[in-house]
Amino acid sequence: MPDSRSINRSMFWRIERRLLSANRGRVLVILLALGAGAAVTAALLNLQVDAKRRLTTDFRSFGANALILPKDSTSTAPQTLPEATISSIPLRLEGFRVAAASSLYLVATVSSSHSGSPLAVVVVGARPRLPMTTVDLTDARPSPPAESGDVESACAVGIGIAKRLRIEGGEQLILKNQDRQEACRAFGIAQTGGPEDNQVIVGLKTAQSLASLPGRISLIQLSIPGTPQQIQNYIATLQQKLPDLDVRPIRQFTEGEARIYNRISGVLNATVAVILILTALCVMAAMTNIAMERKNDVALMKAIGGAARRVLRLFLIEATLLGFAGGLLGAAVGLFLSIWLGKAVFGVAAQPRFIVYPVSVALTVLVAILGAFPLRRLVAIRPAVIFRGGE
């Protein structure tokens, strides 16, 4: 004879199928509500995760977020540090690459064939040749030389200096500092909206020769990827490794990044919470109607010996299956929706982050179970009262 457990299990799922097919209209409404909630939840969560990934990688393109300086760099006399210091900096951080650039600052005069008297300017020697800032090279006539021996003779001129001296791209400039003189060719005009607009940017060797400081630099700029906490940990490690130097974050940059992400995260989390609450209310309203229609069925189950716990389990599993089905479909739609939202809101299409998918499905199942709360009223039904026509 068949095992009683298998018979009970077969009967359980037969009743479950009947429950799902008995109210197809309301079940479809519940599925649509859960699917819509899952789609919006997945889209917003994906935007949040994608924003965090982009801030830890793409945000680095805006420039350096940490500096390495001589300890007494605040004194009136200019201080320098050995150029070889950059070789002791670890350039890997949890899978990301840390970018480093050496710079030497000095004051010199610059003149060209179009200018009258020489103009005193700040000259920045950098390696890489341009510092890690967003530089828009306009009016770039020739490209910077590709040969390693000619790179030092190329320079970029800030837009403010170029206007005052009427410098054009490709023009030769003369830089003088006391009795030392260097020539460079302006391959472009730098326009950043920052201090670079009033600087001349040259190769590091050119600046060292002009300042008579071979092998010396003023500072090292670091572009550190990762979250604000990872950046702080990396800086703390550098401070221990380089105790004779001043390693400091550019706080307005790193703190600004943290504030941007916290605001984005807060808005998206609040929106997700509101969407889930509204979805739960929609499911609860539909479940209330279903509970009113199933009183006779539940009374019959209990009259023939069905335990209240088993009756409640039937409806909880029904809600779980609806939540799982709605979550699977809605979360898949939401991932594609986030691509469009990212492009429409942020101007960049969001990348699907598949960790969001199971989270969205789990949240949808939870909302479906919470929305089934009105079905608990069915457990308290007394069959005799129902069959006599009472409530």
Image: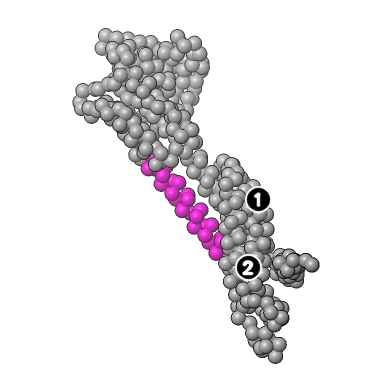
Q: Residue at x 42, y 12 (%)?
A: 153
Expressed as whole percent of the image width and height from the top left, the position of residue 313 reads 64, 69
With respect to residue 175, does 346 lie above or below? below
Mark number displayed over residue 332: 1
Expressed as whole percent of the image width and height from the top left, the position of residue 54 reads 51, 40
With respect to residue 185, does 326 lie above or below? below
Q: Residue at x 41, y 46 (%)?
A: 259
Q: Disc 2 versus disc 1: distance between alpha carbons?
A: 24 Å
Label 2 CA crowd tier, 10 Å (few <14, some 14–19, many 20+): some
Give the mark nearest the N terminus, 2 or 1. 2
Of 143 and 91, nearer the camera is 91
Q: Which quadrant is home to the C terminus?
A: bottom right
With respect to residue 269, does 303 lie above or below? below
Q: Quadrant of residue 247?
A: top left
Expressed as whole percent of the image width and height from the top left, the position of residue 266 reads 46, 53
Three-letter amino acid code at disc 2? Leu
Q: What's the magenta bit mostly, secondary-structure-wise?
A: helix
